[in-house]
Amino acid sequence: GITGKVEEISLFTSIIDTPDNRRFIVPNSEVFDNVIENKTYHPTRRVDISVGTDYSADLDHTREVLMAAAEAVPGRLEDPSPQVVLQELGGSSIDWSVRVWSTTADFWTVREATVRQVKVALDEAGIGIPFPQMDVHMDRTDS
C-alpha cells in the first residue's frame, strides 16, 4: 500500500520515501510476502485515460475525435502509436480508453496533458461526457 522510492534495503527493514516526502520503514517480512510493482523499471510507460461519452454520439466520429486528441498530446512518444479502444457500453455512457506512451520520467505530465486534450476535443466536437444519473419515480397514494 506504499508508493515511493526505495532508499535502502537492510537485513531487517526497507526504507521507502514517498513522493510527498514521507519516509516509511517497512519490516522486510512485509516486503517479502507481497507483490512489488516497480513503476520506473522500464524507460517508457503507457498512459491510459478512461472516458465515457454520450450514447447519442456517433461511434466513428467519437473515435476520430479521441484519436486526434491523442495525437495532439504534447510530450507523448511517436512510437508506439496512440490507441483509442472502445471498452464497453456502460450504464450511463459508452466507455473508451485513450492510450498514449511516454517516457517514465514524463508520465505524470503526459497523463495530465492527455486528460486535457481529451476533454477539450470532446467539448469542441459537442460530444458530451455524461455522469451517472438515476431516475426516481414516486408513486402517490391517495388516502
Image (spheres, rainbow, N blue to C red):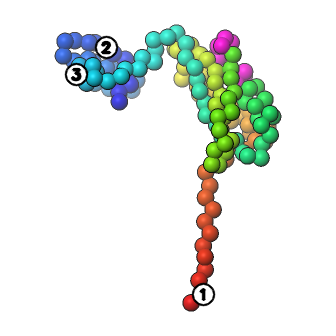
> CA gap, disc 3 to disc 2?
17 Å
Q: Residues within 10 Å of mark 2 (few under 14, many from 20)?
A: few
Identify whether 138 is placed above or below 94. below
Q: How far from the left and from the top, in percent, is residue 143?
A: 56, 90
Residue topped by disc 1: 142
- Would residue 55 be found to the left or right of residue 43 on screen? right
Residue at left offset 68%, top offset 29%: 85
- Kind of residue indicated by mark 2: Glu
Q: Nearer the viewer, mark 3 or mark 2?
A: 3
Q: Which residues, given as a range, are shown in magenta?
A: 70-80
- Would residue 23 be found to the left or right of residue 134 on screen? left
Magenta: main secondary structure equals loop
In magenta segment, residue 74: yes
> CA gap, disc 1 to disc 2?
71 Å
The front one of 70 and 141 is: 141
Callout 3 secondary element: helix
The answer to whether marks 1 and 2 mark residues whose Cβ atoms lie closer than 8 Å is no
Q: How far from the left and from the top, in percent, is residue 82?
A: 68, 20
In the image, which disc is placed on residue 7? 2
In magenta segment, residue 17: no
Outermost residue toward the bottom in this view: 143
Q: Earlier in the sequence, mark 1 or mark 3?
A: 3
Residue 69 seen anywhere in this rendered image of the structure = no
- Kind of residue indicated by mark 1: Asp
Q: How far from the left and from the top, in percent, is residue 33?
A: 28, 23
Q: Earlier in the sequence, mark 3 or mark 2?
A: 2
